[in-house]
Image: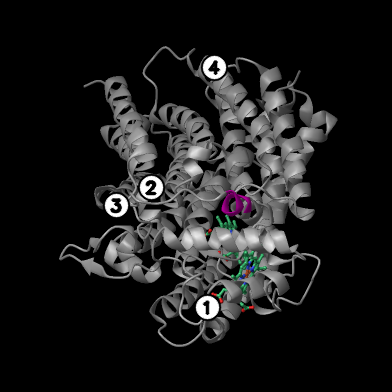
Amino acid sequence: MSKRGLFFCLCAVFAVYSVYVWTAGTDTPNIQPPSEQAKAGLALFQEKNCIACHQLYGLGGHMGPDLTNVASAPDKGVDYLKTFIANGTDKMPNFKFSEAEIDALAQFLVFLDRTGTYPPAHPEISWFGAVAYSGANNGK
Amino acid sequence: MANDTGLRFMLLGLLALAASLFFGVLSAFKFLYPEFLEALPFHKLRPLHVSLAVSWIFLTAIGGVYYYLPNLLGLALFSIRAARWHFWIFLVTGLAILGAYLLGQFGGREYWEFPPVLALPIFLSWILFAVNYFNTVIQRRSAWPVYFWMWGTGIVFFLLTFAESYLWLFPYFRENMARELAVQWKSYGSLVGSWNMLVYGTAIFVMEKISGNEAMAHSKMAFGLFFLGLFNLMFGWAHHTYPVPFAEWVRNFAYFVSMTELFILGKIIWDWRGSLSDYQKHRFRRPYRFLFAADIWVFINLVLALIISVPAFNLFTHGTHVIVAHTMGTTIGINTMILLGSIYFVLEQRDTDSALQTVSGMADHGYWLANGSLLIFFLALLVAGLIKGTYSGGSFGDMMASIEPFLLIFAVAGIGLMMGLWMVLLPALRRIYSLVFSVTARNPMRVENGQKTNL
Ligand code: HEM
């Protein structure tokens, strides 16, 4: 095959693969869409750049803890996380959020929590180093 | 109109690097002393550091393409005016982005944290670049060397994946967090692949010119590398997102894909090094050395990348400083070394006796300081990350306290790295500045060392 042919073949496969990833690739079939409040929370999460210090599913900056399941973690939960968001700490700024904004961020974190578990709950490691998660949503 | 756009891009790239290093050091100290410099909290410093670092890579790679095509490859740019526009759009948008960060105006997502409207001028400026590039290289009727393919692929895939990284603006993508994250990291994986195309293409070009061996850039091995790199760019991204609830085959496929790429680059550079004559090493001493350093860092990073791409190990390294070691190990050790090599190649190729030689002692010391510091920096991040990844004790705060000594080593080594790279980039900055802004240097008919040089 010519170089050009190979190049365009790869591009075609890439296009098909991309559409698959965009539409069907997730492992979270029964997820409820976020509420309006949670969507507003996600927008705020971006506007304040929380991800510079925090992670979602382990992705983000490393100054603060991962927030994927803070809404349901033992000894944590919604009131706990609202306290942090409302007051900050010596490492986390106090953003002086209104009550409505705090609720929106909390709803976003509740929505996030329902999408899966991080770190994965029951990883099964195969002999060649691949990892499977039992059940949908990483065992959630 | 003199065509110095390539040099201008490089000049801006060097400034971005100098500033990025400074913000990087401040960020590292913020881990330890969050109360210091209250006005610049970590969530402003981090994007300042990372966006400037990414800009350094793009600006300098783009500068190389604009410089090499007309000056060393004999292909007049299709449009000098479009290149100028590209430069100015980049500069003005870049300043707007830095301003937005300083004011705490975000709104984007990690790596492009700026308000999404600012993505539009960036996208437009790349279209100008793409049109200019393809209309320029099309003049070359004979078979294209591999770096033409790599540059072209880098440009096109930047456009595609930059657009993909904004799909989140459509509500459909936000309604499912797994999809949202997967598409985000799919696009970033390919984006890194596209800047690697630009940078590795530059490496191969510079190697060809130093060694005078034109066959290399047409060899089967070089094209093998190119297609493997392209394959990785397209399908390797999911190693960033192993823990995200995503179709299992996509993850396993990425695992397989990841095991391939860097190896071949190492092999090419290795083969090339053996084939150089002493004269050529001496004639282009600094670019040669930078490429040599990149070669060593390829091997070190290859080992780490292979390990963390095995999902079983990734369980312990994901979300830790091991990943930061990988990101900065590759962007500094490989990309930055190659791009500094490219800049010094431009300078040494222009000035055989050179204003450069007199100040270059500093650059040589800086080279060693930077590489030595980088090694300590890299190891400290690895250890900090491994402790975090295997930590089973109490709270997040306790874990952070236990890795603090290593974060301190990282921060101090970061100062060494910053000083070292500043010492390298300063002489280059001065020289390029004088080439771009002094009247004599701009005269395209200037006779230098008996050779006519063309700007
Ligand atoms: C050429 C020089 C450099 C380049 C290209 C570079 C690049 C990067 C990149 C791409 C990231 C994002 C990492 C990730 O998301 O995993 C990053 C993060 C970071 N860099 Fe650098 N960097 C450079 C020098 C430095 C120096 C000298 C320091 C000082 C110690 C530094 C400190 C940091 C810190 C603290 C972070 C944030 C880590 C985190 O919370 O995730 N960098 N850098």
Q: Which residues are magenta?
A: A36-40
Please identify the quarter of the rendering in which residue B359 is found.
bottom right
Q: Amino acid at mark 3?
A: Arg
Q: Is residue B70 above or below residue B109?
A: above
Q: Amino acid at mark 1?
A: Lys
Quick one: SS at disc 4?
helix
C-alpha span from label 3 to label 4: 39 Å
Residue B145 point in image, percent of width and height: 39, 26
Residue carrying label 1:
A76
Q: Chain of mark 4?
A: B
C-alpha span from label 3 to label 2: 9 Å
Q: Tags 1 and 3 in contact by the CB under 8 Å rule?
A: no
Quick one: SS at disc 2?
helix
Q: Tags 2 and 1 in contact by the CB under 8 Å rule?
A: no
Numbered circle sitting on residue B237: 2
Residue B220 point in image, percent of width and height: 26, 32
C-alpha span from label 1 to label 4: 60 Å
Frontmost of labels 1 and 3 is 1
Please report the residue visible at 48 percent of the width from the left and 28 percent of the height from the top.
B156
